[in-house]
Amino acid sequence: MKLTGELETAINDQVALEHHSALAYEQLAYDMEAIDLPGVASWFRAQAAEERVHADKFAQHMLDRDAHPRLRRIDPIESTASDVLAAFEASLEQERVVSEAIRGLYRIAQEQGDIDSLPLLHWFIEEQVEEESTVTEIIGRVKLIGDDGSGLLKLDQELGARPGGEAPADTAQ
């Protein structure tokens, strides 16, 4: 079934939103590097990579359904985070925006009777529940740590163990 109309436009919008999320996470990684928390920065880089995979997953769905994804300008990332709590609160807000957008896609697919999109959207709904839960848990832990520097360094180390968050290699020679 060819993807057309409102759902095609909405999925293409989701591709852009996922890319925007990736950039927002890259900014948070830079913010955490700036305050000497490389593990937290690594966690945000891994999250950015995951958002790019999500964008590709939506784009591939469009391509598989004979629709053509169109990249467009992405709004600049306006905010920065000066501490870990602010960074994860920004992350949670970003995830909530993405979750609502995916629920909107699901509603459109239901209205249009597009059952071919539902498996993909079900996967993303489950993914977003997990994403929000993970970030909420980290926020809770950051609040428990408070101003305890050793606790923050331990959390930094733990979050840095997440695969896929390595900083880009220095290619300057």
Image: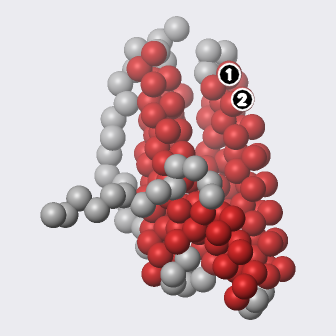
Residue at the (42%, 60%) spot, across then down: 167
Residue at the (58%, 68%) spot, across then down: 39
Which one is nearer the viewer's eye here, 55 or 34? 34
Mark 2 is on which residue type? His
Crowding around mark 2 (Cα neighbors within 10 Å: few <14, some 14 to 19, many 20+) is some
Residue at the (60%, 73%) spot, across then down: 87
Q: Position of residue 138 (x, y in %)?
A: 75, 66
Q: Is any atom of residue 172 visible in this view?
A: yes
Q: Which residue is mark 1?
A: 119
Mark 1 is on which residue type? Pro
Q: Is any atom of residue 17 visible in this view?
A: no
Is residue 8 shown above or below 138? above
Q: Position of residue 80 (x, y in %)?
A: 49, 77
Q: Residue furthest front?
A: 173
Q: Which mark is residue 122?
A: 2
Which one is nearer the viewer's eye here, 111 or 145? 145
Q: Residue furthest left?
A: 173
Q: Secondary structure at mark 2?
A: helix
